[in-house]
Every structure is written in structure tokens, then in C-alpha cells.
Image (cartoon, helix red, strand yellow):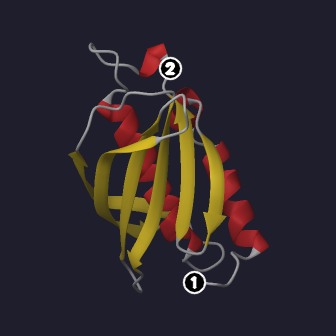
């Protein structure tokens, strides 16, 4: 995947992301767009925490799902939109730190369904990252 994402596709991803109320609520941003790969991040704010002070699994899931969805969209034809068909999450460590970073990737593009995965990491104050969740699912053009 050495080719760049065409400008109209990158613009469509940014426009779609800007319409997501959930991502705005999380304070999320797009960090990178590449063919079959999108990186999103969001601060771990008090409003997103669970009872132990870690980022809530719901925030972790939402960020990972969106990163994976936009990775799928980057591999779809211009003018497409994307919807999640199904998504599984494994929470593998507490999400402690300053921000969540979700890297979505296309595993296998298809004519109708695209298999995706996302790794969500918690970034500490010193910049080190710990994987906190693994997601796998399928996306469909909308």
C-alpha cells in the first residue's frame, strides 16, 4: 500500500469524521490517513473515565470502531460511505494515560464486505504506549 490516498477520498474521510457527534464528544482527531490505514486519537478526559479512573471501554470501542471504519473507507471507491456490520473487542489492559490512539487497518478488502482490525493504545505522559484493546470486524459500503 505505497500509493497515497486520493485527495477526494481523504477529504471524504475528514468530512465524514467531522459529522460524527460521538467523535466530537470524545474530543477525537484524525492523526493519519493512508491507504487501508487510519489513526485516530482522543484525550483520556475525566468525562470518559470509568469508576477506576481508566478510559471507559465504550470510548475505547468507539475510537477503534471509527478508526477501522475509516481505514475501510480509504480502500473503497470514491463516493462511498461506510457502516459497521459487526465488531468484536478484546480489552487487554486498563486504558490509563493521557490519550487513546486507535490504528485501524484493512485486513482484506472485498467487493461487498471489508475485514478490518484496530489496535487501541493508551499513551502515557512520557509518550510510551500500551496496547489496551484489539478489535476485529467487518465493514460494508453505505
Q: Quadrant of residue 28?
A: top right
**Whether residue 114 is situated above or below residue 21 in the rendered picture:** below
Q: Position of residue 8 (x, y in %)?
A: 76, 71
Instruction: Identify the element where label 1 is drawn.
Output: loop
Left or right of residue 125: residue 33: right
Return the mark for residue 114: none
Left or right of residue 107: residue 81: right
Residue at x 40% of width, y 47% of height = 120
Instruction: Identify the element where label 2 is drawn.
Output: loop
Q: Position of residue 72 (x, y in %)?
A: 48, 69
Query: For the image shown, how many numbered marks are present on the structure?
Result: 2
Residue at x 36% of width, y 77% of height = 113
Direction right: furthest residue:
7
Direction front: furthest residue:
126
Left or right of residue 14: residue 128: left
Residue at x 65% of width, y 72% of height = 79
Return the mark for residue 45: 2
Return the mark for residue 1: 1
Mark 1, Cα crowd under 10 Å, few <14 / some 14-19 / many 20+, is few
Residue at x 73% of width, y 76% of height = 6
Which residue is nearer to you in this view: 32 or 81? 32
Q: Quadrant of residue 51?
A: top left
The quarter of the rendered structure image containing the N terminus is bottom right
Q: Position of residue 62 (x, y in %)?
A: 41, 42
**Whether residue 54 is situated above or below residue 102 in the rendered picture:** above
**Whether residue 31 is situated above or below residue 106 in the rendered picture:** above
Q: Earlier in the sequence, mark 2 or mark 1?
A: 1
Q: Are marks 2 and 1 in contact (CB under 8 Å)?
A: no
Compute the Cα span from label 2 to label 1.
34 Å
Q: Position of residue 39 (x, y in %)?
A: 56, 55
Amino acid at each position: 500500500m505505497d500509493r497515497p490516498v486520493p485527495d477526494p477520498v481523504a477529504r471524504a474521510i475528514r468530512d465524514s469524521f467531522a459529522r460524527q457527534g460521538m467523535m466530537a464528544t470524545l474530543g477525537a482527531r484524525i492523526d493519519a490517513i493512508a491507504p487501508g490505514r487510519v489513526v485516530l486519537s482522543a484525550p483520556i478526559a475525566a468525562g470518559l473515565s470509568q469508576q477506576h479512573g481508566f478510559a471507559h471501554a465504550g470510548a475505547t470501542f468507539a475510537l477503534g470502531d471509527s478508526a477501522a471504519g475509516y481505514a475501510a473507507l480509504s480502500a473503497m471507491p470514491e463516493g462511498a460511505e461506510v457502516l459497521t456490520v459487526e465488531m468484536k473487542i478484546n480489552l487487554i489492559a486498563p486504558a490509563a494515560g493521557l490519550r487513546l490512539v486507535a490504528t485501524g487497518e484493512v485486513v482484506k478488502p472485498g467487493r461487498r464486505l471489508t475485514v478490518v482490525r484496530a489496535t487501541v493504545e493508551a499513551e502515557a505522559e512520557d509518550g510510551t504506549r500500551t496496547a489496551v484493546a484489539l478489535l476485529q470486524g467487518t465493514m460494508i459500503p453505505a
